[in-house]
Image (cartoon, rainbow, N blue to C red):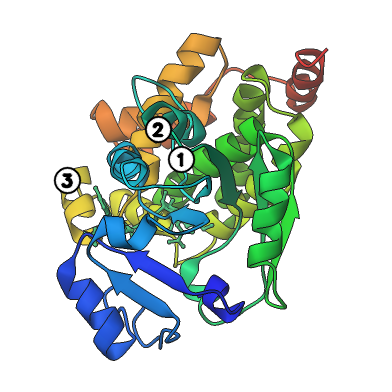
C-alpha cells in the first residue's frame, strides 16, 4: 500500500489463488486487512515468474520460516539486477543465520541482487490507515538502502537509513521474544511495572548479544531497537504479545499457535537466541526464562519467580561491559 500510494505498480504474488482473486476482483484482503480497500495499482499474481521477471525491486514479506523457499523460487525467474528488500523479523534456529544471510545463501540467479532490510515499529494495521510510521533501512550496500528509502518515503511513512545491518536485523528479531514475555506477564495479571522491567532489561540483553555479534550498541536505542520493543510489547496488534497473553492465561503453546493462524516469530526466535546466548556466552535471563516456558515445561509463574529470585547485580555493570566489548 505504501508503494502504491507512491504511484508504483505493485505486482503482489501470493501462494493462495483465492487471495489473488480477491485482490484483483474486489481490491481487498479480508483475512489479513479487514475493511481496507486496496489501490487498483496493486495487482495479484499466483504465477511467480510473471510477477518477478521484469521488476527492479522485490519485497519479501513472508515469515522467516518461508524465506529460504521463497528466495529459491524468486531467483529462478529474476532476469536482471534487482534489489531484494526483506521485512522479516527472525533468526533461524540451528543455523543461527540472520535473514540477510539466509537470502544470500539461497539466491542463485546469475543476475546480481542487492539485499536491503526494512524494519522498525510498524504494525501493518496502522500503516494501512496511513498513521504516522517510522522505519529504518539497512544494507551492506547503502546506495541500495537509500534507493529503498526514496521508494517508500511519504508523508505518513518516514524512512531512515542505518549502516548497522547486524544491529537492525538483531533488534527486529529479538524484540519478539520480549513481546511474548510482555504478553505473558499481562496474561498473569501483572501490570505496567513488570512490562517496563521487561522492556528495559530486555533491551539490555538484546544489546548485550547484538554487540557481541558485531552490532553498534547505539542501534538498540533506535527505531529497530527500543522503538520496535515499545510498539510490540504494548500493542494488541502484536501477534507475539497476543500469543504471550494466551500463554500467561494458561493455554498450552500448540493451542495458542493454532488459534493465532498467523506467524508468531518469537517462538522460533527464542530457540535461536537461546542457542546464540550459549554460543556467544552472553547472559540472557529473559530469553532463557521464556525458553523454559515454551520448551521445557516450566509454568509462566515459576519462570517469573525464578527471574525475580536471581542473585543481586548492578544495572550499570551491563552498560560498562557493553561498551568495553566494543573496544
Ligand atoms: N504484520 C506486521 O505488522 C509486521 C510483520 N513483520 C514481519 O514480516 C514477516 C511476515 O509477517 P506477516 O506478513 O505478518 O506474516 P503472515 O503470517 O501474515 O504471512 C504473510 C504471508 O506469507 C505467506 N506465506 C507463509 N508461508 C509461505 C510460504 N512458504 N510460501 C509463500 N508464502 C507464504 C502467508 O500465506 P498464508 O496466508 O498461507 O499463511 C501470508 O500471505 C514476519 O517476519 C513479521 O515479523 C514486520 C513488520 C510488521
Ligand atoms: O513487528 C511488528 C511491528 O513492528 C509486528 O509484530 P508482531 O509480529 O508481534 O505482530
**Between residues 107 and 22, which one lies in front from this camera angle?**
107
- Find numbered disc 3 in the image and state the secondary structure of the residue it sits on: helix
Give the alpha-carbon distance from disc 2 to disc 1, as whole Å.
6 Å
Mark 3 or mark 1: whose residue is earlier in sequence: 1
Q: Quadrant of residue 169?
A: top right
On the image, the x and y values in percent for residue 98 come to: 48, 31
Left or right for 127, reference 251 = right
Left or right for 197, reference 183 = right
Q: Quadrant of residue 214?
A: top right
Give the alpha-carbon distance from disc 3 to disc 1, as whole Å.
17 Å
Residue for badge 2: 270
Residue for badge 1: 177
**Between residues 307 and 114, which one lies in front from this camera angle?**
114
Say above or below: 273 vs 43: above
Q: Quadrant of residue 76?
A: top left
Which residue is located at x 41 percent, y 77 percent? 42
- Find numbered disc 2 in the image and state the secondary structure of the residue it sits on: helix
Residue 143 shows up from this direction? yes
Mark 2 or mark 3: whose residue is earlier in sequence: 3
Residue 298 shows up from this direction? no
Amino acid at each position: 500500500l505504501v508503494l502504491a500510494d507512491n504511484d508504483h505498480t505493485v505486482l503482489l504474488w501470493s501462494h493462495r489463488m483465492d487471495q489473488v482473486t480477491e485482490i484483483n476482483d474486489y481490491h481487498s484482503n479480508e483475512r489479513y486487512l479487514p475493511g481496507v480497500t486496496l489501490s487498483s495499482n496493486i495487482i495479484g499474481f499466483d504465477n511467480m515468474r510473471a510477477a518477478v521477471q521484469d521488476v527492479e525491486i522485490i519485497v519479501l514479506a513472508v515469515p522467516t520460516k518461508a524465506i529460504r523457499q521463497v528466495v529459491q523460487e524468486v531467483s529462478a525467474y529474476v532476469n536482471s539486477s534487482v534489489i531484494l528488500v526483506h521485512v522479516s523479523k527472525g533468526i533461524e534456529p540451528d543455523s543461527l543465520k540472520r535473514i540477510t544471510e539466509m537470502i544470500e545463501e539461497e539466491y542463485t540467479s546469475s543476475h546480481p541482487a542487492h539485499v536491503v532490510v526494512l524494519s522498525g515499529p510498524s504494525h501493518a494495521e496502522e500503516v494501512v490507515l496511513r498513521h504516522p510510521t517510522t522505519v529504518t533501512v539497512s544494507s551492506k550496500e547503502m546506495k541500495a538502502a537509500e534507493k529503498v528509502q526514496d521508494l517508500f518515503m511519504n508523508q505518513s511513512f518516514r524512512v531512515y537509513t542505518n549502516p548497522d545491518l547486524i544491529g537492525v536485523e538483531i533488534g527486529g528479531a529479538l524484540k519478539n521474544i520480549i513481546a511474548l514475555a510482555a504478553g505473558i506477564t499481562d496474561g498473569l495479571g501483572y501490570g505496567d511495572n513488570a512490562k517496563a522491567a521487561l522492556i528495559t532489561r530486555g533491551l539490555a540483553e538484546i544489546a548485550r548479544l547484538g554487540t557481541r555479534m558485531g552490532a553498534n550498541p547505539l542501534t538498540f536505542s533506535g527505531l529497530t531497537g527500543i522503538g520496535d520493543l515499545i510498539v510490540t510489547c504494548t500493542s494488541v496488534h502484536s501477534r507475539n504479545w497476543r500469543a504471550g497473553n494466551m500463554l500467561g492465561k494458561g493455554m498450552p503453546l500448540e493451542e495458542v499457535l493454532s488459534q493465532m493462524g498467523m506467524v508468531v516469530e518469537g517462538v522460533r526466535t527464542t530457540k535461536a537466541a537461546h542457542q546464540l546466548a550459549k554460543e556467544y556466552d552472553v547472559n540472557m535471563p529473559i530469553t532463557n526464562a521464556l525458553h523454559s516456558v515454551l520448551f521445557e515445561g516450566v509454568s509462566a509463574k515459576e519462570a517469573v519467580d525464578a527471574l525475580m529470585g536471581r542473585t543481586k547485580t548492578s544495572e550499570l555493570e551491563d552498560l560498562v561491559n557493553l561498551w568495553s566489548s566494543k573496544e
